[in-house]
Amino acid sequence: MNKLTIAGIGPGNRESMTVEVDNALQDAEVIVGYSVYVDLIKPYYPGKDFITTPMTKEADRCRTALDLALQGKNIVLICSGDSGIYGMAALAYEIRGESDIPQIEVLPGITAACSGAALLGAPLTHDFAVISLSDRLTDWNIITKRLDLAAKADLAIVLYNPASKGRPDYLLKACDILLHTIPDDRPCGIVKAIGREGESAQILTLKELRTASVDMFCTVFIGNSETRVISGRLVTPRGYRL
Ligand code: SAH
C-alpha cells in the first residue's frame, strides 16, 4: 500500500506523544524529519532507517517522503507538536496535488499552545489566536495586522516562533504593536523547551515580555482582559459563576 503517514510527535517527551503516533512509528520502516526531532525520538525506535534534512528544506523532506511512499515503503514523516500547525501536512498535500497516490494520513499531536498552556496554568480557556512571528514565509505587514486585530478583538494570543538568530528583536516589535491596545501590566507567559531538557515556564507582564529573552524553542502567551495570575498560575476564566 502506498501511504505516507505524517505525524505530530508532540512537544518532545515520549509521554506526550499519542499512542496512535507511537504505533505508527513502531510500524514504520523509514522515519523522515528535521534532525532535532529525529534525535528526540531515535532512542525509542531502534532498527529503523532515519532520514534527516536541515530545517529550511521542508519541501525536499516532503518530496523524499512522498517518493519513498510511492516505492511502497512504510514511511512516517514527523513534525514537532502537531503536523498541521506550522508543520508539513499541508505542504505534502500541495506537493502531491490532485492525486490520491500515495495515500496521505495525518496523525495529530499535542501542539505547543496546548502543552505550553498546561505548564503555565490555564491561559487558553476562552477564545484565542495563534500567530507565528516568523516572516520567512509570511510578510511582516500581515503579521503586524494580525497582532493588532487579535489585540483589538481581546483574544488571548499564542506566539509561535517568537525569535530566531536572524530576528532577535521580533518579540519586542510585536509587543510594541500589542501595547497600542493592551495595557502594559497584562499577564503573559513564556514557556521554553516543553517536554525537553531545560524545560521552563515564566509568568511576567507585557511590559516585561517586551525585553524578555526568547529563542526559537520558546512559545509566548499573552492573556486577554480577563486573564489573571491565581496562586502563581496564568488563568483565563471562561466566565463560570463561582
Ligand atoms: N508544529 C509545531 C510548531 C512548529 S513551529 C507545534 O504544533 O507545536 C516552531 C515553534 O513552535 C517554535 O518556535 C516554538 O514557538 C513552538 N514550539 C514547538 N515545540 C516547542 C517546545 N517543545 N517548547 C516550546 N515551544 C515549542
Image (cartoon, rainbow, N blue to C red):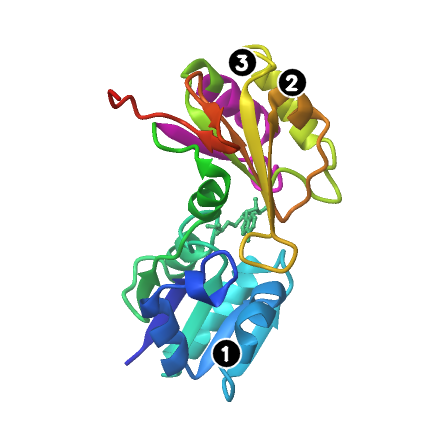
> Is residue 104 left or right of 87 when viewed as pictured?
left
| Residue 142 falls within the magenta-colored stretch | yes
Q: Tell which circle, 2 or 3, labels the residue nearer the N-terminal end.
A: 2
Q: Nearer the viewer, residue 106 or 60?
A: 106
User: Judging from the image, what secondary structure is the residue with disc 3 in?
Assistant: loop
Percent across and percent down for residue 23 are 34, 75
Q: Which residues are magenta?
A: 127-150
Neighbour class for label 2 at 10 Å: few (<14), some, many (≥20)? some
The residue shown at (45%, 68%) is: 77
Query: Most extreme residue toward the bottom, as rendered?
Result: 47
User: Judging from the image, what secondary structure is the residue with disc 2 in?
Assistant: helix
Q: Tell which circle, 2 or 1, labels the residue nearer the N-terminal end.
A: 1
Task: Check disc 1 and give the amino acid type.
Answer: Tyr
Front tag of 2 and 3: 3
Neighbour class for label 3 at 10 Å: few (<14), some, many (≥20)? many
The residue shown at (75%, 42%) is: 166
The answer to whether 49 is drawn above or below residue 93 in the figure is below
Give the residue at mark 1.
44
Give the residue at mark 3.
182
Quadrant housing residue 161: top right
Residue 176 image label = 2
